[in-house]
Amino acid sequence: MQKELQNLLDHFPEFRGRILELFSRNEDFKSLCFDYWQCRSAMLKIREHVEYDLQQETEYINLCKELENEALKFLIRAD
């Protein structure tokens, strides 16, 4: 499974079917999944870095939350 898809599936397991459906047919949602994966990856790299940067991590945490909220809008919206 694609890593950008797996991140969202891990975060919203209760929406697995809807996530798979949207990922396969909605380019905006697919792009959102990719953005979320990039954000999470960057945040994890910051945490592992020797010169830990709390401000930068906080910015990525906030961005991830915004992307999660955007994903939820997709997931609960009726087509």
Image (cartoon, rainbow, N blue to C red):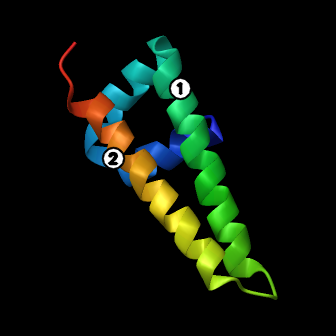
Horizontal and vertical percent position of residue 59:
56, 67
Horizontal and vertical percent position of residue 13:
33, 47
Q: Which of the two discs, 2 and 1, labels the residue nearer the N terminus?
A: 1
Q: Secondary structure at mark 2?
A: helix
Horizontal side, residue 20 vs residue 35: left or right? left
Q: Amino acid at mark 1?
A: Lys
Horizontal side, residue 77 vs residue 37: left or right? left
Q: Can residue 17 be seen by looking at this rendering? A: no
Q: Amino acid at mark 2?
A: Asn
The quarter holding residue 65 reads bottom left
Crowd around label 2: few <14 · some 14–19 · many ≥20 (10 Å):
few
Of 63 and 25, the residue lying toward us: 63
Residue 69's tag is 2
Horizontal and vertical percent position of residue 20:
42, 26
Q: Secondary structure at mark 1?
A: helix
Q: Can residue 64 be seen by looking at this rendering? A: yes
Which residue is depicted at the point 61% across and 79% down? 55
**Taking 39 as reference, is 4 above or below it?**
above
Camera-side mark, 2 or 1: 2
Please identify the residue farthest to the bottom as the structure is shown: 51
Which residue is depicted at the point 53% across and 74% down? 58
Residue 30's tag is 1
The quarter holding residue 54 reads bottom right
Horizontal side, residue 19 vs residue 77: left or right? right
